[in-house]
Image: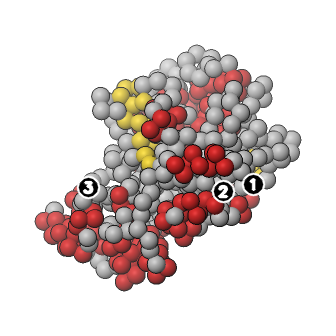
Amino acid sequence: MMRRTILGALFFCLLDIEAMAGSALDAAACDAEPVLFDQPAELLLAELGRDLFYDPILSGNKTVACATCHHPAFGTSDGVSLSLGDGGLGIGPSRRADADNLPERRIPRNAQSLFNLGYPEFSVMFHDGRVERLQNGLIRTPLGNVKGDHHISLLAALSGLPVISADEMAGHYSENPVSQAVRRGILTGPGGARQILAERVAQIAGYRDRFARVFGDDPQISFDHIAQALAAFMAHEWRADDSPFDRFLCHGDDLPSDAAAGMKLFYGKAGCSDCHAGRFQTDHGFHAVAMPQIGPGKSEIFETHSRDIGRMRVTGDPADAYKFKTPSLRNVVLTAPYGHAGAYSDLVSVIRHHLDPAESVASYDRASAKLPALPETADFEILESPQEVQNILAASELTLPPLSNRQIDQVLAFLKALTDRKGLRGRLGVPETVPSGLPVPRP
């Protein structure tokens, strides 16, 4: 600890202390530990979660796995701006709509990467924070508050939502029992969509026996058991905490000169760390940065607009309009496209957007969007409305100083120093097969 404290002091001497006030990086963060799974029973749970993560058995039509949109081959995302869930074929940028079962729409937000979610400081999930650890020990979810007695429960709460989304995994009306339950609003409990999935898993001996080994002879596999396994796998599998930046911060290793200059800008006068604070480059807060809105937007089934007001959909507070969660930047060079709707395909464009949002939106190149073809979609409806664009820009909090091209390159060099390719590969890897016998998603 003494060495790390000294390194931290040296780190602060390198940077503009005044500019970093309130968002400084503390080298003591090196002592923070993620949830560790190093006991036999814990590893059994993570291994069980791995197979479930890659198994399409958890989707209504048995065609979509968690890994379809969160695959290590694409930085634990899927390499497209807005995913095609149920009704899509293939994986990654080559994914396409199934002509015999067309998706009703794209998934409205970019599939986020999954790195370091087992660290307890990650207290909010999803772009709008609709899963959130509250100070009273409860976890807020769209299905109501649940008791969280261990911080991994936050990931378990997250795991139970994509399976009941019609666009993501459940499927659409009358296609299967899961989608029918979702359309009727029966999501949990007897006859609910998640219980149907749990019973489906319980019918497979390769899962049933392993659940018994982990949880004992419970009379019934519940979706809570499944969610705990998925959470254990994600927390165990993808930890991006051994990048060149980590080795600099925690062990005193040198960074390349451009990366060191970029770090000084990032945590100093460029103002990046005002939001991208701390060891993992996120304040876990919500900010309006005027990212271009593409795709179907976030709306209820009875709404017809294409806007996405972000955090306001969770809190109901107009002050939260167009605010989205600050993403962690770990392995960021591997997780394109960027933004809540994946509007930008490269990091230089993202940096330039932060420097001048109005110009960036005005000159936005629609070819930057990586959108699998889907008939009869109006992907740029919001950008074609001057009033909608003005509303987004008016909410922006960005007031960053200008950067030269050289400085932008240096910031980019620092972002590259946040890469942990070992963390990308994962600790358990992609299974060859899964107990259901269904195809494992592969590029």
Residue at the image position 51 percent from the left and 25 percent from the top: 143
Residue 250, by quadrant, is bottom left
Label 3 element class:
loop
Q: Is 359 situated above or below 228?
A: below
Kind of residue at badge 2: Val
Q: Is residue 376 visible?
A: yes
Q: Amino acid at mark 1?
A: Pro
Q: Is residue 50 visible?
A: no
Give x and y (percent) for residue 403.
44, 74
Q: Give the secondary structure at mark 1.
A: loop
- Dot 1 and dot 2 residues touching (CB under 8 Å): yes
Q: Quadrant of the N terminus?
A: bottom left
The front one of 3 and 127 is: 127
Residue tagged 3? 22
Locate residue 212, reporting x and y percent: 48, 31
Report how far apart the C-alphas of labels 3 and 1 lie in the structure: 41 Å
- The location of residue 107, given as percent across then percent down, is 66, 43
Q: Which mark is residue 80?
A: 2
Nearest to the eye among marks 2 and 3: give it: 3
Foreground pick, 190 / 313: 313
Q: Which mark is residue 372?
A: 1
- Say which amino acid is labelled 3: Gly
Quarter of the image for the C terminus: give it.
bottom right
Looking at this rendering, what residue extends furthest in the right direction? 100
From the viewer's side, name the closer residue of 374 and 57.
374
Cα–Cα gap, marks 1 and 2: 8 Å
Residue projecting furthest to the left: 2
Q: Residues within 10 Å of mark 3 (few under 14, many from 20)?
A: few
Position above or below: 218 against 47: above
Q: Residues within 10 Å of mark 1 (few under 14, many from 20)?
A: some
